[in-house]
Amino acid sequence: MAYLINQFIVGIIIFVILLIASIIGLRCRTLVIHEITRHSRAGDSCSLSMDLVVMNALRWTSVLPRGGFYAYMTMYFVRDDGSVIQFFRGGYVPSLSNTWRIMDFAPGIRLFNLLVNADGMGITDVLVPYPSSLELPDGLISPFDTRTGEPTGMVNFLSIKRALASELGEKLVQSMSLAEVVRRIRIDLSFYDDVGLTKYSTSLLKLLAHAGIQINGEVRVIEGSVDTNLRKVVNCPYLFGHVACLGKAFRITWAWLTIIEAFLSLAYTFMPSLFILLIIMPIIYVLVILLSLPRIT
């Protein structure tokens, strides 16, 4: 009798703990990069953007944080010896509506402007978003608020070579082709909603390849036309790596495990034979995630 009472108490405690964890999971949000869009040409450039989805731990689409969120990008140049130089530090990325804080109902960010040549096939430069300088009340000229560090000016776009020249020197950068620059650049994309941080890392080479642009001696459009939009669903393992996508898959699905385990623990209080299933369920969950990783992310 004492054993049955202890079993009942343990089952109820586990049930309550997991149920609370599941409720917390409904409030946890993860920003998922869903699609990459190469927009049709406007003038001599076309923009590259990302469509985002906010999900909770049940993989249900969630609402944006009340205050929106900021997206920012850090870029690194990889030297021949493998060392890296951080040359675009914490550059804020604007929303599709050209504001620095993302508040749109269907969130998206503008990553780059791609300058195209006359035939519409070659890419002559990659421009990164940067706030224009404004004169502050104390007479200083700065693109950032001196107190918060957040952008204050309108959205400008800066040549990636010009941004790189500040660290490597003008002469060295000008001696390199755009294709060589693109091959050597890695990117960190971070999304911050005042509570949580979601981070993705990739290379500029993979990012442009995902948008139908080939880097092979020169930078050229090989998929679609610059006069029409090209929209592609993100292949997470290819773009960000299996480890990062596995972590994202766990963040947007773990509440399903806690809900199932909660009800199994409740059933365990009456059916001791379910103890084995209670133990192996996390293993089954991990196997399901591994087998369905590309589809989940």
Image: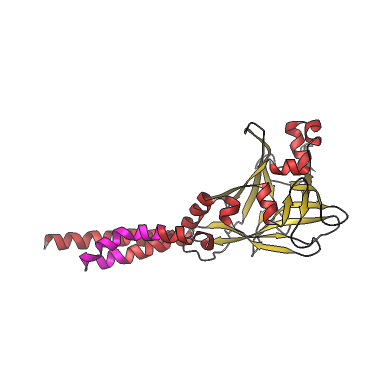
Horizontal and vertical percent position of residue 120: 84, 57
Image check: 238 left or right of 126? left
Residue at 41% in and 57% down: 286
Q: Position of residue 150 (x, y in %)?
A: 67, 45
Q: Residue furthest front?
A: 216
Q: Is residue 170 magenta?
A: no
The residue located at (78%, 52%) in the rendering is 220
Please check the rendered image and state whether residue 269 is part of the magenta-colored stretch, yes or no: yes
Magenta span: predominant SS is: helix
State which quadrant residue 161 falls in: top right
Q: Nearer the viewer, residue 271 or 134?
A: 271
Q: Residue visible at 36% across and 57% down?
A: 283
> In the rendered image of this protein, does residue 152 appear above or below residue 14?
above
Give the residues in magenta.
264-286
Give the camera-side residue of 47 and 178.
178
How is the model colour-coded? secondary structure
Q: Is residue 129 left or right of residue 15?
A: right
Looking at the image, residue 17 sits to the left or right of residue 155; the answer is left
Can you say which quadrant of the picture contains the C terminus? bottom right
From the viewer's perspective, tell me whether residue 179 is left or right of residue 188. right
* Looking at the image, residue 85 lies above or below residue 206: above
- Residue 143 placed where, x, y %? 75, 42
The answer to whether residue 137 is seen in the rendering is no
